[in-house]
Amino acid sequence: MRFTLNGRTVSLDVVGTRRLLDVLREDLGATGTKEGCGEGECGACSVLIDGEVVDSCLVAVGQVEGRDVVTVEGLALQDGKLSRLQQAFIEHGAAQCGICTPGMLLAAHVLLEQSRRLTADDVREGLAGNLCRCTGYTKIIDAVLSCTK
Amino acid sequence: MHEVKYIRPKSLADAVQTYRTTPGCRPLAGGTDLMAMLHARTVRPQPLAVLDLWSLAELKGVRRVRDTVEIGAAESYTGIIGSKDVQQHLAALAAAARTIGAAQIQNRGTLGGNLANASPAGDTLPVLLAYDAVVVTDRRAIPIDKFFVGYRKTALQADELITAVRFPIGRQVAFRKVGTRAAQAISKVVMAVSRDPARIAIGSVAEVPLRARRAEAALDRGDVEGAIAAVADDIRPIDDVRSTAAYRRSVTQNILRELL
């Protein structure tokens, strides 16, 4: 099967019912995507498929045939510089243990693509599917809001 | 689960044929229930194969068909929320869809999946009951009040695929869900109510999403207080990890009062 991962075509011979999460981490070495709960509650494994944020633990890898997958490794700019959102997470101290960070970044990235005019409530709702076990939500929300200006 | 075979049909006709002829095959849409269950190995019986319906164009989209709105079984909640026809004619369905999970789940969850899974806590199911929706399959149309036949059991035959859900338009339905938080919560009580005709449909209060028939009869007579009293006897709530029977009974009466 084939799909695009962070702009590059990948071809794989895999059982289609394996979780996208596992194929990303085990077969493709894209370990930026984390496993949290493994049942679609926590959002740690969030990735983008055709620009929509999804939990990769709930996606059968066969379902991304021909689709465009973006993981946290694909957020940085072409020259390897961090995106404005990633830089904002660093500047606001929006990561503690870091497990939720890749998923938070991808969900926030989509939110900012949809609109640059976001309130704190919009960000809370947009990130409602991403749990931070350190409960460092305030700094995460501040970091996202800083990118709306 | 690595030994479970993945089958991707080319068309709906191909899917119907494959489902009929492949033993131990389980339909897969957005995976929000089935993938978690496959990984935890809690699907009984353990499937030999999954039939991936997610990408079938015939199962996508929201269409206005005469006096109905028809929603493809594999259309996502995000697609449903964004549909002008749903916003205009099925506001309670849009409201229910917005309470399901969060963006990640709304991008993958489907009406077909909610129906086939038939969880008593399925958030859209009381809404379907309150609208008198019709479940369209590859061979027939099943009225929603004949669809849920037991705990996670449906009227579907073993080789029958849900293709769409059809909603009559022109009905006012109110929706309310009570959970631990606004997002990512499995309901403690979920309710959809229409006054005319009288429909009071409730989830998470019995082994199936049910219609409160005694309460509906009272509402038909214009007896709102009678409906609120009767609903406590229509439901069969249990104590479980999410809530208690007593709390569910009391909340059911409170939100029925609020919605009426």
Image: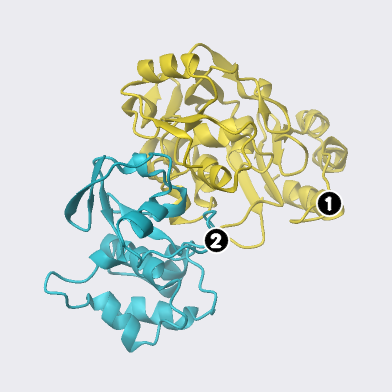
Q: Nearer the viewer, mark 1 or mark 2?
A: 2
Q: Colour of chain B?
A: yellow
Q: How many marks?
A: 2
Residue appearing at x 83%, y 49% in the figure: B249
Circle 2 sits on which residue?
A: A37
Residue B69, compared with residue B204, is above or below; it is above
Task: Classify the position of the C terminus of chain B by image quarter.
Answer: top right
x, y (%) of residue B49?
48, 30
Residue appearing at x 48%, y 61% in the figure: A129
Name the side, left or right, on which B60 lies relative to B95: left
Circle 1 sits on which residue?
A: B239
Which amino acid lies under the numbered mark 2 shown in the image of this protein? Cys
Residue appearing at x 40%, y 66% in the figure: A103
Q: Colour of chain A?
A: cyan
x, y (%) of residue A5?
24, 54
Q: Label 1 lies in what chain?
A: B
